[in-house]
Amino acid sequence: MLQAKQKTNYNYSYTYTDYKAKYVQEKNLSRKGFALCMIMLIAAGVLTAVYICQFIQITHLNYRIDILEEEFHGIKEESNLLRYKLAAETSIARIEETARNELNMIEPEIVEIVLLEDVKENEIIAEREEVFFVKVFNNFLEKLSTVKAEEL
């Protein structure tokens, strides 16, 4: 069962002061709401402007990327062409043709191969062998001079 709560404050007033206070209070609330609405609109406008600026920058950078990619492909093609020309100019057939035609070179009648012994390499090998021999000898002397407790 429902029961109504008794109201203890029966203060009804229809005077001008009560009406004016109520009107001022409602006006203050509407001003606060209007100010809040304006702040939100300004914030939304700023965010929209920032978003549009970023979108414009991204579009500009994409165009720049396309231009740089085209330049890169052009440079890459030029590099490949220069590599091809270099390979053609440094080929053995081209060098032989230049030697025969322009420098009037001919093939030798007799081919002699002379092998020279590299003295420096033999000296290095001898030094390594000496070092190895010295190491072995030093190890041998060290083992002789070391006395173990078990042997005594």
Image (tube, helix red, strand yellow):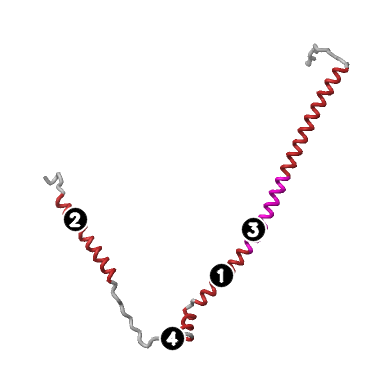
Foreground residue among 99 and 94: 99
Q: Quadrant of residue 131?
A: bottom left
Tag 1: residue type? Answer: Asn
Label 2, label 4: how far apart the Cα atoms are: 61 Å
Residue at screen point 59% across, 69% down: 77
Question: Where is residue 58 shown, x and y percent of the image?
Answer: 67, 52
Q: Earlier in the sequence, mark 2 or mark 4?
A: 4
Q: Is residue 44 left or right of residue 78?
A: right
Secondary structure category for the residue under label 4: loop
Label 1, label 3: how far apart the Cα atoms are: 22 Å
Q: Marks 2 and 3: CB-CB under 8 Å?
A: no
Q: Which residue is mark 2?
A: 138
Q: Quadrant of residue 25?
A: top right
In the image, residue 29 sits, relative to residue 114, either above or below, namely: above
Q: Is residue 134 left or right of residue 7?
A: left
Query: Is residue 73 shown in magenta?
Result: no
Tag 4: residue type? Answer: Met
Q: Of the numbered discs in the image, which one, if any, rests on residue 119?
A: none
Crowd around label 2: few <14 · some 14–19 · many ≥20 (10 Å): few
Crowd around label 1: few <14 · some 14–19 · many ≥20 (10 Å): few
Q: Of the numbered discs in the image, which one, if any, rests on residue 105?
A: 4
Crowd around label 3: few <14 · some 14–19 · many ≥20 (10 Å): few
Q: Earlier in the sequence, mark 4 or mark 1?
A: 1
